[in-house]
Amino acid sequence: MLKELKKLFSSRLTWVALLLTLAYMIYLSYADWRGMGKPDGNDGRQIVKFVDEIGVSNDYNEINKNLEAYWAKTESLSKESKEYFDAASKLYDSASIARYVYVDFPEHRRNMVTELFYTVQNEKGKKDPDSYVLAYNEKALEYYNKYIPLEFKSTGMSNDRYNLYYTLYNLSYWEVIMIAFIVIVTVRMFTMERTSGAYQLINTSRKNSRRLFFKKYAAVLAVCFLIRAVHFITEILYYVRSAGFTNLYLPIQQFTDFEGCPWQISIAGFIAVKEAAVLLMYGAFAALAALLSVLILNPLVSLIVNLVLLESGFLFYRYAEFKTTDAADKFRTYVPHALMNVKEYFIKFDYCNFFGVPVSRIAFCMAFTAFICIVSLALGFILSGRGKR
């Protein structure tokens, strides 16, 4: 694989694509930094510390008393002063967390469980109950009837840092640039011998040609995964620095956007699933690009076809997302591009009908993406040995 990497980076096109991708990554970080007013993370860390101090008893009534006592101390402050603004921000964020953890979340869960229970009973009472509707609601009832250990803690992602939070949990148009990068390096890797004429020597042995196929694919993945690792580490360090991002052991339901998530998964666990989905998506796109590069002999035509096919998938997904819920659900079931926004799978009980059995939509989409990857690699491997001797 090292030889393939050397060949890949011997091309100016690879370096240009890599530098443009990294430049865009830097631009996104800079845009977030400027958009948040040059945050240094102190506000987020102060809120984390403040919540820990007033929430020692972990009792809702006691926490309210502590909040009232804290607010009484601020009455002497000028409403135009920074101290007053900071105190009000801490109070608002802390009160919001307390009400959500101790009142809103438990109450909403009880309501969901009650509604699901009666739905199941009503369906069972019908003469001809729908087996899928019954199975779907019974599974939902099973998950929502479990205890989620929320805590009166702050993750550092306060309301004034919402843009940072949203960016962390929703992949941006950065992935569109990554798709283009994957296509460029894959097409370059798999058409290099054709442009240089070396394929005529390689094709004297189909065994050698097919063995090189997986080495090339591994080289492309190594580069893409390395870029993703740099992006991920930069992203996490940036949010820790900018918003005091912490307490990753807490359930994902700690955020109100994930209140409807049925699974017991931590914030760190969600981030791990998101990264795994992104890497799987990269692997599938690289496999598809490799297959098309083997099928299409002309490098320029191969590049154009790959870009149109893979980038249009993203555009169709975004269009369906804004068009109708049903269309978006279908795309999120079968189209790998939907894995760009893993958050959408976790905000509700998102299951699909698989031959009358309710199946997690994200699990199905990841399995289908893996299937596309395997089939593309198998076909590419078989076809890579063809050619004139």
Image (cartoon, grey):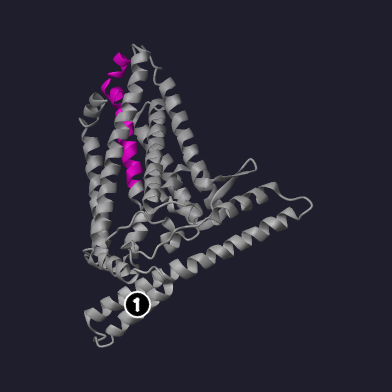
- Badge 1: residue crowd in 10 Å (few <14, some 14–19, many ≥20): some
Q: Is residue 367 above or below residue 293?
A: below
Residue 8: % across, % down: 25, 30
Report the front residue among 21 and 301. 21
On the image, which quarter does residue 193 sit in?
A: top left
Measuring 27% from the left and 60% from the top, which residue is drawn there? 32
Residue 190 sits inside the magenta stretch: yes
Residue 83: % across, % down: 23, 79
Amino acid beneath label 1:
Asn
Query: Is residue 96 found left or right of 352 in the rendered image?
Result: left
SS for dot 1: helix
The image quadrant where one finds the N terminus is top left
What is the residue that sits farthest to the right in this orientation? 127
* Residue 264 visible in this rendered orientation of the protein: yes
The range drawn in magenta is 176-202
Query: Is residue 88 found left or right of 320 in the rendered image?
Result: left
Measuring 25% from the left and 88% from the top, which residue is drawn there? 76
Q: Is residue 39 above or below residue 225?
A: below
Residue 28 sits inside the magenta stretch: no
Residue to which mark 1 is pinned: 66
The image quadrant where one finds the C terminus is top left
Residue 168: % across, % down: 34, 55
Measuring 30% from the left and 38% from the top, which residue is drawn there? 224
Query: Is residue 327 found left or right of 123 in the rendered image?
Result: left
* Residue 305 visible in this rendered orientation of the protein: no
Report the front residue among 229 and 55. 55
Prevailing secondary structure class for the magenta stretch in the rendered image: helix
